[in-house]
Amino acid sequence: MQQNKRSVRSKLFSAFLLFSGIMLLMLWVFQVQFLDQFYRMIKSHAVKNAAVSIQQAIDNDEDYKEQIEAIARKNDLCVSVLNEDLTEIYTSNRRDPRCMIDKLKQSEINSIYQEAVANGGNSERFIETDEARNRKMSEVPPEITDFTPDNDPIKKEKGLQNMTYASVVKNEADKALVVLVNAQISPVDATVETIRTQLVIITAVLILLGMLLAYIMSKKIAKPMIAVNQNAKQLAKGNYEVSFNGSGYREISELNDTLRYAAEELSKVQQLQRELIANMSHDLRTPLTMISGYGEMMRDIPGENTPENVQIIIDEANRLTYLVNDILDLSKLQAGVQALELQSCPITKIIKQVAERYEKMQQEEPCQIKLQYEESCYIQADEIKITQVIYNLVNNAITYCGEDRLIIVKQIKKAETVRIEIIDHGEGIPQEQLPYVWERYYKNKHHKRSKTGSGIGLSIVKSILELHHAVYGAESEVGKGSCFWFELPISEQQAP
């Protein structure tokens, strides 16, 4: 796949320039190319509105002449009211030399009237003229007609144009009246030329300012992103001490916070890996040293080939096997490659079997494991993995039990779940450190490492319980002991 090699700065720079170009193009199009069309459209709209107002004045008031005069002065119009036979009743602004109504021939007026009747009562005409026709119709050159088409080149050369709008209305006597509204449409060629000259200057200035602004903004926006990218490359190389302190935009700040958090977590993972290697090396070295030492002693010293020494080698080999199995189990659980085989499990029976096995295994300073329950219960779970959970929790309690050497296992049946509690009376754990007891090789000044365990028992417990979507936790008080618990749903159908 071909990658886009353009930088953010170049893209932002191009985007700003494109935006400036589009804005300038719109100015040129609307202010120069379509200025005349917009002007004529607005003027035509004003004339039509004035005609409507005049029509309403005639319909509602017999003395409409004053209202027509006011409308004509306000909108700079020339208005004439004619009878149905096209004889004049009233004309406003007659003295205005720009008024074309007096200069229209009778045939022209009749043509406009007939067109209005044919169009349902309204008609619109653009009559081209020049200053000579505005002042004196007799001086108009013969080649300029009264009704010059809009696309006639003469119209474009002469420039001056008048719009005459005709409307057929009825008065109170139900007689038809013809209202002629005339307005001069001034040429905009000079205005367009002026605007064009101004736009040339404005375009040059805006292009320079746009390029400068685009450069400044693109650099300002891209700078923190470039800094984050460079620091992220350092993070990818394993430099977890890199600082992400970029600011300026919310998204950049959030990205810096995310990368800073990632760097902190990766640093913790790296530290955990170092501790894991150190601790596992220690745990693996001890049984290997014992096996090697006793084996050499049995080989070199006569009479040392005793069942006791052989049993020590077997015990250390088993211990080594447990350590390796714990590591493999934890790796599989955290990788999510182990599937559950849910079934109805006799949790009470499992706890009893685990307690009996531990009582038989203990030789030095044995602990008493006391099970408290009201009735036998079944849960929905993976029997092998839940047995492993019970083993690890009981082993953890034995390791950190108090002077009374008593471990209490409580089974509490609720409405829909069974709660299992493993309680010891040891030194306890401070409240602020309770969330960390589930981590691999957790240790602090109040909590010693097990001499026989792998140090990852509680991590295995956590992974298995989360795989079951179980509720679990730990409660402890310094000097009084700890309680580790979990809850799983009751199984309605008991296994045979």
Image (tube, rainbow, N blue to C red):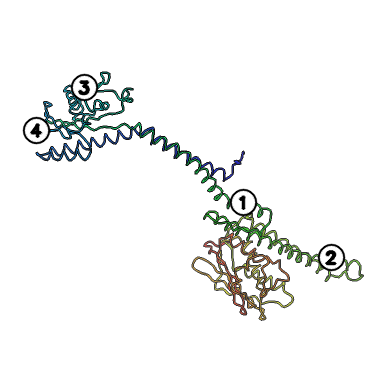
Query: Which of pointers 4 and 3 lies earlier in the amino acid sequence?
Result: 3
Residue at point 13%, 26% (across, down): 86
Three-letter amino acid code at disc 4? Asp
Q: CA distance from mark 2 to mark 4?
A: 129 Å
Mark 1–mark 4 Cα distance, whole angstroms, equals 84 Å
Q: Are marks 3 and 2 in contact (CB under 8 Å)?
A: no
Kindly report the distance in space between the C-alpha atoms of the residues bearing marks 3 and 2: 133 Å
Question: Which tag, 3 or 2, sits closer to the chain's start?
Answer: 3
Q: Earlier in the sequence, mark 2 or mark 1?
A: 1
The numbered dot on residue 496 is: none
Residue placed under numbered mark 4 in the picture: 174
Q: Is residue 421 above or below residue 54?
A: below
The residue that mark 1 highlights is 229
The residue at which mark 2 appears reads as 292
Q: CA distance from mark 1 to mark 3?
A: 82 Å
Nearer-the-camera pick, 328 or 305: 328
Q: Mark 1 falls on what kind of element? A: helix
Name the front one of labels 4 and 3.
3
* Quadrant that contains the C terminus: bottom right
| First-in-chain label (1 vs 4) | 4
Q: Which mark is residue 138?
A: 3
> Which quadrant is the N terminus positioned in?
top right
Q: Quadrant of residue 66?
A: top left
In the figure, is residue 193 to the left or right of 40?
Answer: right
Q: Nearer the viewer, residue 193 or 273?
A: 193
